[in-house]
Amino acid sequence: MNPDDWPELLRTPADGDHFVQVYQDQDFLCEAVAEYVGTGLRQGDGAILIARPAHVAAFTRQLSGAGLSPAGAR
């Protein structure tokens, strides 16, 4: 898989897939989490995030910027 195709991988995981995201840049992490969680929320799925408060706030901003309501999903 082309490394630039990661958003598609996050949008269409196969049953049983597990992901580990290694990152150096918090903006990239937020984009990846929002892509994965946002796709699920748009499909009516749920998500469980275990994250530090600062990351939760950043993920919430990213999801809100994508037109989703993280507060409504909680």
Image (spheres, rainbow, N blue to C red):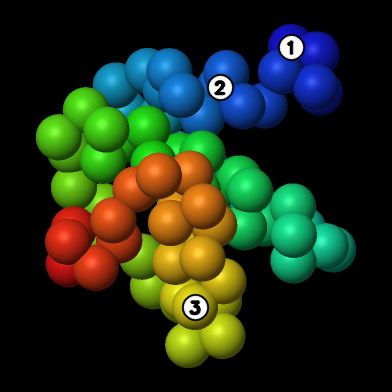
Q: Is residue 60 positioned above or below 11 on the image?
A: below
CB atoms of marks 2 and 3 within 8 Å: no
Residue type, numbered disc 2: Leu
Where is residue 63 shown, x and y percent of the image? Answer: 45, 53
The residue sitting at 49% across, 78% down in the picture is 57
The residue at 80%/13% (across/down) is: 2
Reading the image, the residue beneath label 3 is 57
- Residue, x 26% and y 40% (percent of image)? 41
Given this view, does label 2 or label 3 mark the residue nearer the observer? 3
Q: Give whichever of 59, 20 is nearer the camera.
A: 59
> In front of the other: label 3 or label 1?
3
Disc assigned to residue 9:
2
Q: Label 1's element?
A: loop
70 up-or-down from 43: above or below: below
| 1 and 2 marks in contact (CB < 8 Å) | yes
Alpha carbon of mark 3 to alpha carbon of mark 1: how far?
31 Å
Q: Is residue 69 above or below residue 43?
A: below
Q: Which one is in front, 11 or 69?
A: 69
Badge 1 is on which residue? Answer: 1
The answer to whether 42 appears left or right of 23 in the picture is left
x and y percentages locating residue 67 in the rendered image: 40, 44
Q: Is residue 31 left or right of residue 74?
A: right
Q: Amino acid at mark 1?
A: Met
Total labels: the figure holds 3
**Residues at marks 1 and 2, CA–CA distance in whole angstroms:** 9 Å
Visible in this render: residue 22?
Answer: no
Amino acid type indicated by mark 3: Ala
Which element is circle 3 on? helix
Quadrant of the drawing holding the N terminus: top right
Residue displayed at 44% across by 66% down: 60
